[in-house]
Image (cartoon, coloured by chain):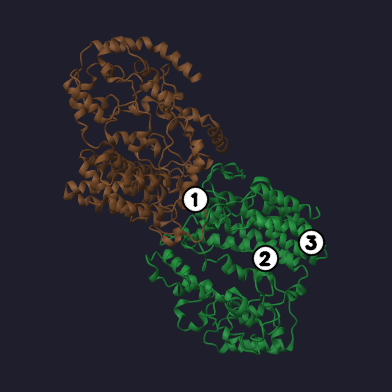
Amino acid sequence: MHGRSNRMRIAVLFALPVVVLLTTYALGQPPAEPKTFTTASSEIRYLGSAYCSLCHTQPQPQLKNSLQHVWLNEFTTWSKTDKHSLAFKNLKEERGLAMARRLGKDVLKAETGCLGCHSASVAEVMRSSTDKNQGDAFNRADGVSCENCHGPGEKWLGEHASSWWRTKSPAHKAELGMNDLRSPSIQAEKCLSCHIGNSDEKKVVTHAMYAAGHPPLPSIEVATYGDQIPRHWRTLQEKRDDGKNNPDYDPKAVENHLAYEGDQLERSKLAVVSAAIALKTSMALLAKESNSSAAKPNHEDVPGLGWPDYARFDCTSCHHELERPSWRQDRGFTSAPGRPPVVRWPSFVAALGVEKLATDDPKAKLLLEEMKAHEAAIDDATRAKPFGRSEDMGAAAAKYAAWADGLAKKLETSKFDGKLVTAILQRLVQEASETDLDYDAARHVGWTIWAFRSDLGKNLKNGEEVDRILVRISSELRLQLPTGRDQSIEKQLSDALRTMGEYKPTAFREDLKSLAPLLAP
Amino acid sequence: MRPLKPHKMRPAYIFGTTFALCVLAVSPRSLPAQTLRPTQPALRYVGTGSCAALACHGGRREPLGLKGSEYSFWSTYDPHRKAYGVLFDDRSKIIERNYRRLGSVEKAAPENDATCLSCHVHPNFSPKSVEFEQHLVADGVGCESCHGPAERWLSAHSERWWKGVSDRDKFELFGMTPTKDLTYRAEQCAVCHIGTPEAEVNHDLIAAGHPRLLYEFSNQQAKQPRHWRIEDDKSRTPDYEVRSWALGQTVGTRTSLRLLESRAQRAQEIHEPGPWPEFAEYDCYSCHHDLKQPSRRQDLSRGDVKPGELAWGDWTLNGTRRIATEKSFTSIDSADSALGRLQRLMANPSPNASDVTRLSRLASAELVPLIERIEQERFSLRQVDGLLSGLLRSSESADAAEWTQAARGYLGVVALARARSDLGGPALDGLAVDRLTSLRSSLNIPTIRPGDSRLVDSPADYDPSRVTTELRSIREIFPR
């Protein structure tokens, strides 16, 4: 309550100059675009969601030219129904307080490392290092708010309310600090910077945090997760149709939308591109931590940040009851017994992306060899000693991350139509049915199958039978996500952890084996 | 090492020694007597066949402890007999496949793997001599695996003068292990049941499928089908039960520290460094448990151990510390001792191996005077009671009572309860037996969880508050 009234006060305080600023843009002429662009600088200020709420909750009369692009409920949808707006508040709930007690740290202080994901520590860091943010409307109590995903608003806030904004190229917007979330790879980068982690942005969950009570970060398939967020945006398909059907649309704006090829199966594309980005993100995190270890064996502030940080490894490799007989021991080990594998659940679906490229261009088959070599290098570093030899791991992971970034870029410019998605769905099910996947990888595969399947809709043959099996898989792997603010993790965690502990790869393989013949061409 | 007892010079002994020295003089492998250790692989093993004659140790096997029945008894009842045979089991093949990264079970031949044979036959077993010793391999852990290679003592030990030879000379001149001496006996068992630099079960091997090692000298002896008479043990040392428990704890800790030292040392080698961190050093259940919510572990406060760090020494240290306190070596129990500093260091995700080498060497040296004191000083009933109460109090100390500590505490209480009655204390009454039985069942693993078909080999349903209450009720049985 306090947070909200505070926000409103600040909003009112700043409303006038902002409105003046916006009006200037609304009445003015589009400025010429600069010839060259650089990526958004971290120097750009965060303004705070109070600014956004001005237009995204109610129409501003002087901006009526832009109204065709605004739903007016974006802010309310986020603030009332989207869990991301609770991110900061949760730190002060029971679990956050218990974690603080166990760690002996103040979870609300930027240096403890929680705010990176639960608010916006980049802004926090800037705030403490310079005075230029003083007096703005940024409020860390907003949790994960507008600018965490869309980018810091200092330079684009005014211009994006103008009538010409839609005609501007994504490169121009990026220059001003706005993230082009229509791009699958950029969207995935933003989501995964918290949902996997990013050291540069100080978004890292350490093993000490987990041990103190942070729920395990599950694997994530961006398209399926995105479908569960109370939506305050339009799909690419919808945007494209808007542009086509609305005579008021500026042709240049339509062109910008068409650049995203709304006639593609966008969920499927997002699923595959985001797998490559997930691979890149997890490898980049691994590279950063294993390389920094020698210099900083024990990090002063963030609890537990030294190499090896067990959080970079597959949880259930260690965290399982000892059983007789042991399916792990009977199965054998791809790496080596007693040498837990690193978090690498994205690689199975990412490999599917390579196969997709190879269907477009036979030369892309080389990519598969490259990927195998990267996997082998990670395996070698993992095998060398328990929790890996950090020097080798750092080098191998950095190279693999760069490679996965390249893969994502290639995938982003390739086409995902119904024929292709039918083919890769069949391939995915076939290959996964022949592999023992760990729990996280199995769920990632499960969600990816869902994304493909829902994109194909009625065009998938044997649809009903396929769905019956998918429903079974969904319940076995708990693929249904706890959607909405009333579905707190606190209600789910106990069952979720039990499912994780009881998972056996053979059951999932059997399900997929019964699915494969239904998808056969 | 402890000072050995002075011996009386008997004529037969003088003859025997002279005979032995003659043998040494003509032997092509002769070595100066003082450097001859039974661990020298130079000594030949002759095989259990040489012990098995009906007139020697292969007589009728009942009743237990009958002199002359040792071989028969061992070969019928003692699981050590099966140590080699077990290597042909499917499980052993799976372990070998996983450990050696072979890819398929068909390629796995644990029966030829030197690492396996070093404990499943004997520590000096050389696979190069497999053909030569083929008939010995099949014995498993046979007579000489514990009693020492018999090349020099086989004929001598049946001579009349043999009884006059001192333990030290039997050991150093003839290669026979003085198993009657509890320190040597405890060390002898620990060679395989804890491990040595030459023969160890590390986490790689456990992860491959080998059972973990839990050394508990006193109770494992009590359970082992014995081919010797416990009355003889007790006649040598009336405080046998407490002594063997105390030596089991301290010698066990020392052996563990030596093993840790060698592991840390090998981790620093440039070529083919050994695995590090070595997770066999830690309590298995620190990591190996399903993730649960609510989690009792998250609210454990364990001294210096921070969230996500590992508990080291849960199985090994508590008993040793109680003995140190009772024997007035309080420094060993302090946080500044080498042991205390080592414990703190080992909680790190990847402890500095050279610091571990140094501290574990210091810590095992710290134990030498304590072990000597145990050897020299007879335990009194009062000391046993002191140990009991210290052990119970430390095992029940609120939320520190993880399964491993509580189980080790229980085993100590059982051993010390045996010791009390030997030293003139009253026998346990029905109530006491009931309480100990109840605690035992509370600690029991494996457990099958309700509604679940998994056979769990870890204390999944362990309830520390219940165990703490039971430990407290057991404390009431014994005098304070």
Q: Are marks 1 and 3 on the same chain?
A: no
Query: In the rendered structure, the residue with mark 3 lies on which chain?
Result: B
Q: Are marks 2 and 3 on the same chain?
A: yes
Q: CA distance from mark 2 to mark 3?
A: 17 Å
Q: State whether residue B379 is above or below residue A26.
A: below
The color chain A is rendered in: brown
Residue A211 visible? The answer is yes
- Residue A315 in the image, given as x and y percentages of width and height: 46, 48
Q: CA distance from mark 1 to mark 2?
A: 30 Å
Residue found at x 38% / y 40%: A220
Looking at the image, how many numbered discs can be counted on the residues?
3
Residue A319, numbered circle: 1
For residue B83, which quarter of the picture? Answer: bottom right
Q: Quickly name the residue at label 3.
A: B428
Q: Residues within 10 Å of mark 2 (few under 14, many from 20)?
A: some
Query: In the rendered structure, the residue with mark 2 lies on which chain?
Result: B
Q: Quickly name the residue at label 2.
A: B219
Q: Are marks 1 and 2 on the same chain?
A: no
The color chain B is rendered in: green
**Identity of the amino acid at label 1?**
His
Residue nearest the observer in this picture, A462 or A407 = A462
Residue A208 visible? The answer is no
**Identity of the amino acid at label 3?**
Leu
**Identity of the amino acid at label 2?**
Asn
Side (left or right) of B131 relative to A402: right
Residue found at x 30% / y 46%: A350
Query: In the rendered structure, the residue with mark 1 lies on which chain?
Result: A
